[in-house]
Image (cartoon, rainbow, N blue to C red):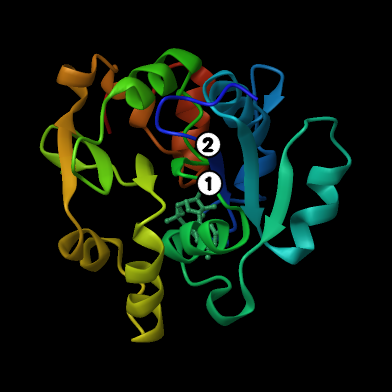
Amino acid sequence: MHLSKEGKRVGVVLAGGGSTRFSGEKAFANNQGSFFYQHILQSLAPHVDQTVIVSRPDLKERFLQETFAAHIIEDCKEVAGKGPLAGLYSVMNQVLADSYVVAAVDMPQLDQRAVKKLTQYPFENALAVVPTVNGRIQPLFAQYQKQCLPILKKQLEAGSHRMIDFLDQIEARYVSNIELDIPADCFVNINDDSSYKDLLAGTQKKGE
Ligand SMILES: Nc1nc2c(ncn2[C@@H]2O[C@H](COP(=O)(O)OP(=O)(O)OP(=O)(O)O)[C@@H](O)[C@H]2O)c(=O)[nH]1
């Protein structure tokens, strides 16, 4: 354990989406010899006390065949498959920590340096640190404090699964990728076959 000043920090790989725009499961898409999820785990691991993959029951076995020391959990039944916020809630509800650094599985250009920069940025009095790129918020590569859980629970119980509604309810610290010193490319996410093809060809446009 290498507890930070802020206490136990968990690194979360959000990997429970449907990948409906992609032919296959994004978590197991290959880039430079690694599955997407392996790359995210490797990026998070040096900067957290524990890594967690939160995913669907039908994918669990596929992660277990791998040798990474990640804790693999499913979405809580009451919110399963209801989007990234459901994934964040499910981790906070099942894995106790002081803070959570979250990354979507489909961000293959994220790296250890970016995670280091994000995790070094202080919460101060905020409940979340959320990067922005060209003014667009990036809540799927962001940090959240454990105190988000009751707020998140209440919102999900009220039937809203929208990230933006959640962020509106908490004090979040928005910080540009430039201030964080994280290249915009790190935030690029792969949603479909065309962007995956561009990634493999090394032609993914910056910051898209
Ligand atoms: N645990 C969990 N993760 C999710 C859920 N929905 C989306 N995610 C993850 O959140 C990130 C962003 O998801 P999206 O790209 O918006 O959705 P997706 O379901 O993966 O893909 P589409 O079906 O093509 O929209 C990805 O890393 C997903 O795996 C969910 O219900 N539970």
Q: Nearer the viewer, residue 141 or 123?
A: 123
Residue 20: give x, y in percent of width and height.
Answer: 54, 61
Residue 1: give x, y in percent of width and height.
Answer: 65, 25
Q: Secondary structure at mark 2?
A: loop
Relative height, residue 96 to residue 18 (above, below) = above
The quadrant where residue 102 appears: top left
Task: Give the mark, 1 or 2, whose residue is nearer the N terminus.
Answer: 2
Q: Is residue 46 left or right of residue 85?
A: right
Q: Is residue 92 left or right of residue 144?
A: right
Residue 97, numbered label = 1
Marks 1/2: CA–CA distance? 5 Å
Q: Which residue is found at the position 61% from the left and 66% from the top?
A: 75
Total labels: the figure holds 2
Q: Which residue is found at the position 54% from the left and 39% from the top?
A: 10
Residue 8, numbered label = 2
Relative height, residue 50 to residue 19 (above, below) = above
Give the class, few, some or many, for how many residues have Cα within 10 Å of label 1's Cα (few <14, many ≥20): some
Q: Is residue 203 visible?
A: no
Residue 163: give x, y in percent of width and height.
Answer: 30, 61
The quadrant where residue 154 appears: bottom left
Residue 64: give x, y in percent of width and height.
Answer: 85, 44
